[in-house]
Amino acid sequence: MPRSRLMDADAFWALIERSGREAGTKAGRLVWLDGELSRRSAEEIVDFDTWLTAVANRGCTWDMYAAYWFVFGRGSTDGFEYFVHWLMGLGREAFERVAECPDEVIEVPQVLHALKLRRTRLAARSGRIWTEEEYPEFELLAYVTFEPYAKVTGLDVEHLGDAVRARGVRGKFPIVKIDFDGEAWDFDDDAEVVRRLPRVAHYRGIG
């Protein structure tokens, strides 16, 4: 885990989860986090970004990508990155559960809700599948430290990245090439899907 100096994992997750209680929208959460981080020291902001990066890295695995691919029917690496950050936004318990066992993504209530909305709206041909708030992606969470760091230090994001790397953490996102953690496997192999992701396979009617 990262060599953070002032903020540990508990403090990081407390801020992520409190943002959800303090604000009812993604944009509101970003504003709240911006304000909270801007009142802290540069070192604390670096610590927060270090944890943000390290936690997101945990989601950058072949099995997590496969779960995203099969559940949502899409394989965009950008979308996958934003999905991992959305999972982080759901809080520590949900994220840890899915990071430990990506197959459990299909049991997360917010995922099931998003899938229900998609089925309902596709059946009704009602246009947009999800609103911005319903969309299972949270791209801007990845950048929430940029403005606070600039305000507190007067330095740009390059210095923030250098400081995070000095903590021993290098981000796996954005994905330049498909090279996730874990063992690569063939998503077209139904038997392998069933073996690795039995709940997801059942949802998709595979096997």
Image (spheres, rainbow, N blue to C red):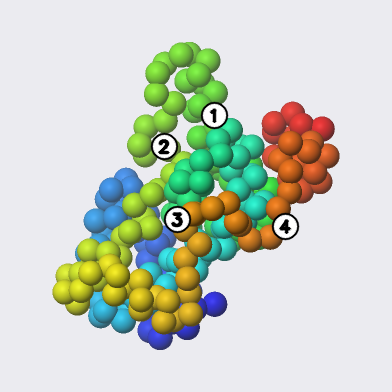
Mark 1, Cα crowd under 10 Å, few <14 / some 14-19 / many 20+, is few
> What's the amino acid at mark 1?
Lys
Helix, strand or loop for disc 1: helix
Q: Earlier in the sequence, mark 4 or mark 1?
A: 1
Q: Which residue is mark 4?
A: 183
| CA gap, disc 2 and disc 1 | 11 Å
Please name whichever residue, 150 or 19, is drawn nearer the observer in this view of the structure: 150
In the drawing, does residue 156 fall left or right of residue 69?
Answer: left
The label nearer to you, 2 versus 3, is 3
CB atoms at circles 3 and 4 under 8 Å apart?
no
| CA gap, disc 1 and disc 3 | 29 Å
The label nearer to you, 4 versus 1, is 4
Name the spot of residue 147 as percent of width and height, x first. Answer: 22, 64
> What's the amino acid at mark 3?
Pro
The label nearer to you, 1 versus 3, is 3
Q: Earlier in the sequence, mark 3 or mark 4?
A: 3
Name the spot of residue 24 as percent of width and height, x first. Answer: 32, 47
Q: Which residue is mark 1?
A: 116
> What's the amino acid at mark 4?
Glu
Q: Earlier in the sequence, mark 2 or mark 1?
A: 1
Mark 3, Cα crowd under 10 Å, few <14 / some 14-19 / many 20+, is few
Q: Is residue 112 visible?
A: no
Give the quarter of the image for residue 187: top right
Residue occupying the far top of the picture = 124
Disc number at residue 174?
3
